[in-house]
Image (tube, helix red, strand yellow):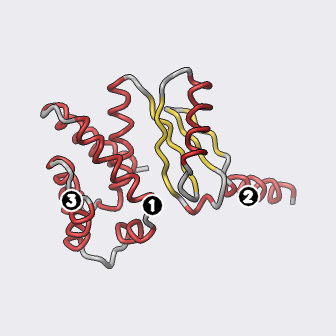
């Protein structure tokens, strides 16, 4: 929970700076690139979470991977490394996207899956969410292998958990309560 609050604070600060400099769209593109790249690369996710790899190495690797990003986005990476918060980079990027979409009047639906969504599945999900909410939304896919399968859909304060891990936990609880 504290990581989520910290990520929100960093995202708000980045958004405020981007608004002041009138570069919210450029920083949004950077944050989408960060989310997509982290979602596609298990090695990158492992590197970000590794306590063994030094912060300087992580910073150099990230700035090399994201070579054409705005100076605000570069500053965010440097700040997260300096504050030993680089593992929350993906969370900060997602929070930034949500805050920026809210600012623009559109919504963001966070979908957590064990594997990246295919374009076809993402489009079907986008259409379904648009029908349910009546709002124009964008889909942000977060990868979390611990959910085993299925998905967790979060739109604003609403969450629908159709993950295998959640179903197994409910089964375990039911089984334990019946003994």
Q: Residue furthest front?
A: 120
Provide the secondary structure element on which disc 3 rests: loop
- Residue mark closest to the camera, 1 vs 2: 1
Specify which label sits upstream in the sequence, 3 or 2: 3
Which label is found at residue 168?
A: 2
Specify which label sits upstream in the sequence, 1 or 3: 1
Query: Which of the two residues, 156 or 44, is positioned nearer the viewer here?
Result: 44
Query: Which of the two residues, 131 or 169, is positioned nearer the viewer here?
Result: 131
Left or right relative to 110: residue 14: left
Query: Does residue 36 lie above or below 97 as drawn?
Result: below
Q: Residue at x 27, y 38 (%)?
A: 12
Provide the secondary structure element on which disc 1 rests: helix
Which label is found at residue 67?
A: 3
CA separation in Å, label 1 and label 3: 17 Å
Provide the secondary structure element on which disc 2 rests: helix
Residue 68 in which image quadrant: bottom left
Q: Which residue is mark 1?
A: 40
Specify which label sits upstream in the sequence, 1 or 2: 1
Which label is found at residue 146?
A: none
Residue 60: percent from left, percent from top: 20, 69
Q: Residue at x 27, y 46 (%)?
A: 10
Left or right relative to 15: residue 171: right
Q: Residue furthest bottom?
A: 52
Left or right relative to 126: residue 19: left
Query: Which of the two residues, 123 or 112, is positioned nearer the viewer here?
Result: 123
CA separation in Å, label 1 and label 2: 26 Å
Tell me whether the residue at label 1 lies in contact with that at label 3, contact meaning CB atoms closer than 8 angstroms: no
- Residue mark closest to the camera, 3 vs 2: 3
């Amino acid at each position: 929970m504290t990581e989520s609050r910290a990520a929100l604070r960093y995202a708000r600060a980045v958004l405020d700076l981007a608004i002041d400099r009138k570069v919210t769209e450029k920083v949004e593109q950077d944050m989408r690139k960060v989310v997509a790249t982290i979602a596609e690369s298990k090695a990158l996710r492992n590197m970000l979470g590794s306590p063994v790899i030094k912060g300087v190495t992580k910073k150099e690797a990230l700035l090399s991977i994201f070579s054409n990003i705005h100076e605000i986005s570069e500053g965010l990476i440097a700040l997260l490394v300096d504050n030993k918060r680089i593992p929350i980079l993906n969370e900060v990027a997602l929070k930034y996207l949500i805050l920026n979409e809210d600012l623009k009047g559109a919504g963001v639906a966070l979908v957590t899956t064990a594997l990246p969504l295919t374009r076809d599945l993402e489009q079907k999900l986008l259409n379904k969410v648009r029908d349910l909410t009546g709002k124009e939304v964008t889909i942000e896919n977060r990868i979390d292998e611990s959910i085993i399968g299925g998905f967790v859909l979060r739109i604003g304060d609403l969450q629908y958990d159709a993950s295998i891990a959640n179903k197994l936990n409910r089964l375990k609880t039911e089984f334990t309560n019946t003994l």
